[in-house]
């Protein structure tokens, strides 16, 4: 099964709506595709919508954060949407998972 998350250009904005749980490889592929399209189109902004994701682990969170920083460096502004029910996991303190 081929997995791909579309990167859409709407006016000066690149928009990504993540409607599936990301695994590590897919997150890295999304980062690469988004930054490549940002460079090719000259879009001024990037919107990453993660409201449909149930869980954002520490690796996915870091990849999304790095993607936003890289977009800013490439002259784009960035924003990410998240709902309050989403959880950031992966922080471990003395063997216990913090939520």
Image: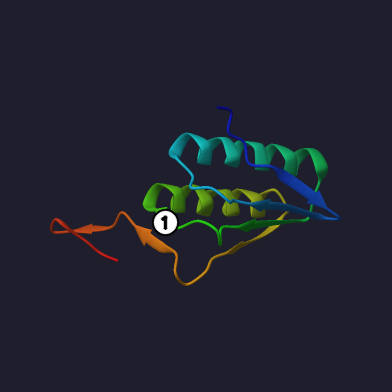
Residue sitting nearer the eye, 37 or 84: 84
User: Residue 89: horizontal and vertical position, in percent?
Assistant: 33, 57
Residue 69 vs 3, above or below: the answer is below
Q: Residue at x 54, y 66 (%)?
A: 82
* Residue 30, quarter of the rendered image: top right
Q: Quadrant of the N terminus?
A: top right
User: Residue 63: horizontal and vertical position, in percent?
Assistant: 49, 47
* Residue 93, quarter of the rendered image: bottom left
**Label 1, residues with CA under 10 Å away: few <14, some 14-19, many ≥20:** some
Residue positioned most to the bottom: 84
Q: Residue at x 72, y 55 (%)?
A: 76
Residue positioned most to the top: 1
Residue sitting nearer the eye, 19 or 96: 19
Q: Residue at x 48, y 34 (%)?
A: 25
According to the picture, the residue beneath numbered tag 1 turns out to be 55
Residue positioned most to the left: 94
User: 4 left or right of 98?
Assistant: right
Count numbered badges in the picture: 1
User: 67 left or right of 63?
Assistant: right
Q: Secondary structure at mark 1?
A: strand
User: Residue 72: horizontal and vertical position, in percent?
Assistant: 65, 55
Residue sitting nearer the eye, 59 or 74: 59
User: Residue 19: horizontal and vertical position, in percent?
Assistant: 58, 51
């Amino acid at each position: 099964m081929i997995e791909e998350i579309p990167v859409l250009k709407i006016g000066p904005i690149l928009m990504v709506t993540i409607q599936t749980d990301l695994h590590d490889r897919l997150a890295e592929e999304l980062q690469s595709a988004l930054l490549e399209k940002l460079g090719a189109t000259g879009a001024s902004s990037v919107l990453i919508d993660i409201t449909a994701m149930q869980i954002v682990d520490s690796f996915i969170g870091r990849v999304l954060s790095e993607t936003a920083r890289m977009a800013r460096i490439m002259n784009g502004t960035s924003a990410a949407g998240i709902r309050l029910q989403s959880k950031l996991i992966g922080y471990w303190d003395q063997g216990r998972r913090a939520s």
